[in-house]
Amino acid sequence: MRASDILSYTTGAVLARRGRSLLTLSGIGIGVAAVVLLTAIGEGVHRFVLAEFTQFGTNLIAVTPGRTTTMGMSGAMIASVRPLSMDDVAALARVPDVEAVVGVVTGNAAVEAGRRSRRTLVFGAGPEVPAIWGMRPVQGRFLPEDGAARPVAVLGAKLHRELFQRSASGGAAALGARIRIGGEPFRVIGVMAPKGQMLGFDLDDSVYIPVQRALAMFDREGLMEIDLLYDRAADSAVVAERVKALLVQRHGREDFTITTQDQMLEVLGSVLDVLTAVVAALGAISLVVGGIGILTIMTIAVAERRAEIGLLRALGAGRGQILALFLLEATLLALAGGALGFGVGAGGAWLIGVLVPALPTRLAWDFVLLAELAAGAIGLAAGVLPALRAAALDPVAALHDE
């Protein structure tokens, strides 16, 4: 038999039993669809979380009070020998390659404007926030350089809408308005552009006040964090070492934790890669189940087609050709199932992206290719035993069964 004859015969055998073939390839199809869909969702989650982490930029260094312990607990949760201070902020601003520094204190307080009140996140920060966090005001300005002792505030986009724009008349003007934060009076000098959420924190539903005011409001001795923006051309590890050396010199010991954006992204990327691999492995279980289905169907096919095999042997087909016929048939079923699964999985990923725009699914082509190759390999492996059995049949005995 020529190669074209083998291919034609195998295709005809698959099409002659359409119902059985469809059920057989659907097992593999479900497995491939599961891999494609789950990895597309995993890749979408991967990109979404990375985008959340990098929305403030990638050339950032964060310093938090307290040294990270071997137990994995952040040092910020235990008392620090020496709190981070505004003097530390001023000193860090002079470190080579550091472009901007801001000290941060956060808390929760009620913000009142007229008869409206909303409990929200309060950021105590400085004028460097727009440059470091990649934010900008759309009305007015951000906290001024000389605003340390002044009771001024900048509203997040959502807080501004809730306090000043939810009325039939369109709302009152926010700039220059008097509000109360934690019972203390402040004057609004700006409104921020929408920024979105960061790991569950709604940055638009927040208010920004001078860090010294926040320290007094929340009765804190030191800053909760110092954020540094460094030159993109600089090595983050080198800048971090300079920051560490300066703070050790000032504090007398390493009672703080330094985290670079590169470190966070590296750890996060590793975790998300493992997550994608796990969901791919879950989908691969369906591939194995589909392979068992092919093994079962091909074993039944050999039993049903004994006379056909005997006739082929009588007409001159060798054992190797019989073996090739059944191996090719099993592989063809697996590849057809893989193609069907890819179409279903890709279509499902596209539909999820349309229905849930916040989760932009993206096909992980390396896993798609791996799933298709695995489908073909599983089909080939599942067809080995039935094919060997078919090739081992005695032609005379097989024709006698007819």
Image (tube, rainbow, N blue to C red):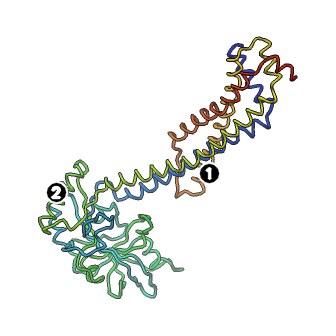
Q: Which residue is mark 1?
A: 351
Q: Nearer the viewer, residue 23 or 83?
A: 23
Residue 144 pos. (x, y %): 24, 72
Q: Residue at x 27, y 62 (%)?
A: 62
Q: How far across and down, in percent of the image, does residue 251 sit?
A: 14, 69
Front position in the image: 291 or 216: 291
Earlier residue among tags 2 and 1: 2
- The nearer-to-camera label among 2 and 1 is 2
Label 1 SS: helix
Amino acid type, residue under disc 1 in the picture: Leu
Q: Position of residue 234 (x, y in %)?
A: 22, 49
Badge count:
2
* Gap in angstroms between the C-alphas marked 2 and 1: 49 Å
Q: Amino acid at mark 2?
A: Arg
Q: Is residue 188 left or right of residue 257?
A: right
Identify which residue, 273 or 49, lies in the foreground: 273
Q: Residues within 10 Å of mark 1 (few under 14, many from 20)?
A: few
Q: Tell me, for residue 242, which label it has, or none.
A: 2
Q: Could you tell whether 279 is left or right of 190 in the image?
A: right
> Which residue is painted at 42% across and 55% down in the image?
51
Q: Which mark is residue 115?
A: none
x, y percentage for residue 83? Answer: 21, 74
Q: Quadrant of the N terminus?
A: top right
